[in-house]
Image (cartoon, rainbow, N blue to C red):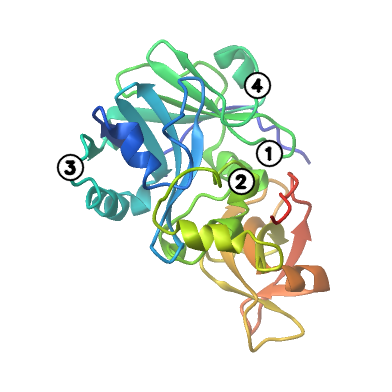
Amino acid sequence: MTYPLNGIAPLSHLGVIRVEGEDAAKFLHGQLTQDFALLGMDQARLAAFLSAKGRMQASFIGFKRSATEVLLVCSRDLLPATLKRLSMFVLRAKAKLTDATGDFALYGIAGDAINAVAGSAQPAWSKADLGTATVVHLYPANGTPRALWVAPATEPAPAGPALDATLWLWSEVASGVATLTTPVVEAFVPQMLNYESVGGVNFKKGCYPGQEVVARSQFRGTLKRRAYIAHAAAEVAVGAEVFSTSDLEQPCGTVVQVAAAPGGGFDTIVSLQISAAQEGALQVGAADGVALSLLPLPYPLLEDI
């Protein structure tokens, strides 16, 4: 039985950080993995905030609401800690960071509902302003277009059929673009989640925390882990270790994101050693592990430099 991925779902698992001031974009440019200095009003950015060791502390979808206001959409569970960490770097920059989650309503739009709301589906990270609302086009799920709707909380919800929130969460996994959450903070460099292949890293921009590690990881032969999509018959936990059945002593990966699959069981994004993914049988947990079967990745990976 197939479940149509079509409609509009409220996204209560996401939060919003507002960055205001004449240095808003410049400040973010110096902190995140993507280029915010050249961010146009018709674009959005996937970006990561890293530790000095290059490990992801948060992931964002960022876009400008005006020349002096940028919104960063992230997982709500890690927003308070992320806001605190980012704010420490403001120093003399003319930028003010606040938790604006309560000021905005966020909806996921999928399938034909995008045509009714935004005219048509567009390439990922395209952005359009519709009155006071913003539509950011995302990576598709199983070929179905998806978009993020962000508008002031006082605005009416976009019109269209209701989409079950669990189906939207599954679409996030099926897209192969992971959203970082608290259990896996500082577990990955961006390439371990394929961020350089889905628009999340700019290798030409200037310095930001962790940049040297990210650049070094991209050179041929040094990248040992990638993100994959996998299916499990039973639920697994974000942050759980993945093992090759040929070696139950040493984990070869980590569960990044999980959602109930429409046809039963659970789909998950896992970050795995490339060698383990190529060798075969995998499971979550060493003792009485839950078997994982890898699914096709829905986008090509960039080659190492």
Can you tell which mark lies on residue 211?
none
Foreground: 152 or 232? 152
Q: Residue at x 25, y 50 (%)?
A: 89
Q: Of residues 203 and 246, which is closer to you in this image?
A: 203
Task: Write down the quadrant of residue 14 in the picture.
Answer: top left
The amino acid sitting under disc 1 is Ala
What residue is pinned by disc 3?
92
Q: Position of residue 207 (x, y in %)?
A: 42, 50
* Mark 3 Cα-neighbour bin, 10 Å: few <14, some 14–19, many ≥20: few
How far is disc 1 from disc 2 in space, using C-alphas? 9 Å
Give the crowd class for mark 2: few <14, some 14-19, many >=20 residues within 10 Å: many
The residue located at (54%, 56%) in the rendering is 190
* Residue 301 horizontal side relative to residue 128, left or right: right
Residue denoted by label 4: 121
In the rendered view, tell whether residue 213 sits above or below residue 146: below
Q: Where does label 1 land, which residue?
A: 141
